[in-house]
């Protein structure tokens, strides 16, 4: 276990799945971890579910995911006015899952704003804010925001923006949970079952001691974290979550975001 090259997304939502791991962990944005896992620079990683949809060579740790069954709070489009009037959405390059989920949802409700890839995930602060000028020029421009940055942004600009929650929209249109991240193990890694068992044990230990995990947090409000972990997030990967991921795979294929064909899991 100690020699494993382990990667994990660097957001609050991953802490119940990684806290207490005995060994080094590389924390990074989801898209960066996907590239490193695909190029064999990592053995095991908690990464965007879309990485598996695009390249299903990995073994999937069964029963563990980061999912939501309704509003997720931390994957949102920040906008003003009606979402149907938005002309341009700036995309966070950190998460391919969120970007492709957004593409699918927009296609399903027949909206076609211009999608612009930002060069950085870092949101501007100060008078300019997240969108151009935070004024009239921003009225038809929106921004996809994910992870801890989305939480901070919502706290900072409460009342100044509306938030189109992608988890809530998925539930509204599909009526299944949405799976954002999975533990993936490269096919050549030995002892995959042992690794998977330890990751499931770690999740169970952290959820059983969630108040202790929350109490160790120094930046975010503890009452918010209690709601976030208990009401907005799921950490299981059961039949409903698998159906949700299969549906996402089907929509991604329909809109040419992944190759067509059935999705086959190799669980450990």
Image: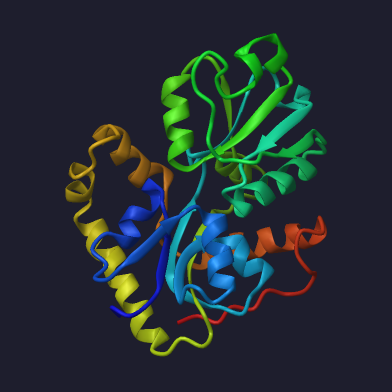
Image point (62%, 22%), residue name: 131
Which quadrant holds the C terminus? bottom left
Residue 242: x and y, percent? 56, 66
- Residue at point 69%, 63% (across, down): 249
Along the line of sight, the residue nearer the viewer: 162 or 187: 187
**Dividing the picture into quarters, in which one does residue 77 lie?**
top right
Please state if 263 lies on the left or on the right of 114 as rendered: left
Total number of numbered labels?
A: 0
Residue toward you, 47 or 204 = 47
Residue 79 sits above or below residue 16 on the image = above
User: Residue 161, image x and y in percent?
Assistant: 56, 19
Q: Is residue 47 above or below residue 218?
A: below
Relative side of 261 to 70, left or right? right
In the rendered image, residue 7, in percent from the top left (x then y), is placed at 42, 65
Task: Write the residue at 80% across / 70% down.
Answer: 260
Quadrant of the rendering where the N terminus is positioned:
bottom left
Please tell me which residue lies in front, 48 or 261: 48
- The residue at the point 61 percent across, 41 percent down is 92
Above or below: residue 92 compared with residue 32: above
Q: How is the image coloured?
A: rainbow
- Location of residue 79 in the rendering, given as x and y in whole percent from the top left corner: 63, 24
Q: Nearer the viewer, residue 215 or 241?
A: 215
Above-or-below relation of 141 to 69: above
Using the rendered image of the protein, determine whether residue 179 is visible from the camera's viewpoint: no
């Amino acid at each position: 276990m100690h020699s494993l090259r382990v990667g994990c997304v660097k957001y609050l939502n991953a802490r119940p799945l990684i806290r207490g791991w005995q060994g080094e962990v590389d924390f990074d944005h989801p898209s960066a971890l996907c590239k490193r896992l695909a190029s064999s620079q990592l053995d095991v990683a908690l990464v965007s579910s879309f990485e598996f949809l695009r390249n299903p060579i990995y073994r999937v740790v069964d029963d563990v995911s980061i999912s939501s069954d309704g509003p997720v709070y931390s994957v949102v489009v920040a906008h003003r006015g009606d979402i149907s009037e938005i002309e341009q959405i700036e995309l966070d390059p950190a998460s391919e899952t969120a970007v492709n989920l957004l593409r699918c949802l927009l296609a399903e409700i027949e909206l076609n704003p211009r999608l612009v890839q930002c060069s950085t995930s870092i949101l501007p602060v100060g008078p300019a804010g997240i969108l151009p000028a935070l004024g009239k020029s921003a009225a038809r421009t929106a921004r996809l925001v994910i992870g801890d940055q989305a939480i901070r942004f919502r706290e900072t600009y409460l009342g100044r923006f509306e938030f189109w929650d992608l988890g809530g929209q998925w539930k509204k249109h599909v009526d299944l949970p949405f799976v954002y991240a999975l533990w993936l193990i490269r096919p050549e890694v030995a002892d995959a079952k042992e690794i998977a068992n330890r990751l499931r044990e770690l999740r169970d230990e952290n959820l059983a001691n969630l108040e202790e995990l929350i109490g160790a947090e120094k930046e975010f409000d503890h009452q918010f974290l209690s709601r976030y972990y208990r009401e907005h997030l799921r950490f299981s990967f059961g039949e409903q979550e698998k159906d949700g991921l299969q549906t996402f795979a089907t929509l991604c294929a329909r809109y040419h975001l992944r190759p067509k064909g059935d999705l086959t899991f190799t669980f450990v």
